[in-house]
Each structure stands twice: as structure tokens, then as C-alpha cells.
Image (cartoon, rainbow, N blue to C red):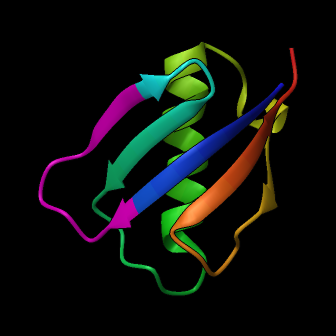
């Protein structure tokens, strides 16, 4: 299942918000440097979907705030 994520790195409080069935807004504390924010977004999504980290894969948007993740169930 593919989901769209609007990422906001470098915030004080981490938050995940479901906008629609396949769209989420994720705010993380990590900065958008050295892939740190992408890694933390994967961790937050894994916690949200109660899946291991290996089941969450970033498909598109490595350097963009708009990202597409593949959730393997």
C-alpha cells in the first residue's frame, strides 16, 4: 500500500496526522540533513502502523517534503 506523506522536519514536538485514507502529515525533530529526517519518519510510520521498520520503504521524495512510502503488510 502506498501512502503520501507531507514531511516537516526540525520541529519541537513530533506529530503524525492522518489527512485522508492515504495521506499523512508527519512532523519530526530531526533536521533534513544526512537522511536523518527520512529515517525518523520511517520509525514514526512503523510505530503508527505497528509494523517492523523493514516493512516501511521510502519510494519517492528523498529530498522533498512530499514523499511516497510503501507499507508492506
Residue 73, image x and y in percent?
86, 14
Q: Residue furthest left?
A: 12
Q: Is residue 2 above or below residue 49?
A: below
Residue depicted at 19% across the width and 63% down the height: 11
Residue 9, picture quadrant: bottom left
Residue 66: in magenta span: no
Residue 16: in magenta span: yes
Residue depicted at 35% across the width and 63% down the height: 8
Residue 39, image x and y in percent?
59, 59
Left or right of 52, for residue 17: left
Residue 14, image x and y in percent?
25, 45
Q: Residue furthest front?
A: 20
Task: State which region is magenta.
Answer: 8-18
Q: Nearer the viewer, residue 18 or 33?
A: 18
Q: Residue furthest bottom?
A: 33
Residue 34, image x and y in percent?
58, 86
Screen quadrant of the N terminus: top right
Residue depicted at 82% across the width and 36% down the height: 54
Residue depicted at 63% across the width and 27% down the height: 22
Amino acid at each position: 500500500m502506498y501512502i503520501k506523506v507531507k514531511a516537516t522536519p526540525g520541529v519541537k514536538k513530533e506529530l503524525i496526522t492522518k489527512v485522508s485514507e492515504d495521506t499523512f502529515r508527519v512532523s519530526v525533530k530531526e533536521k533534513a540533513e544526512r537522511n536523518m529526517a527520512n529515517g525518523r519518519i520511517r520509525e514514526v510510520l512503523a510505530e503508527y502502523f505497528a509494523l517492523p521498520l523493514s516493512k516501511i520503504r521510502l519510494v519517492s521524495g528523498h529530498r522533498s517534503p512530499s514523499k511516497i512510502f510503501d507499507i508492506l503488510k
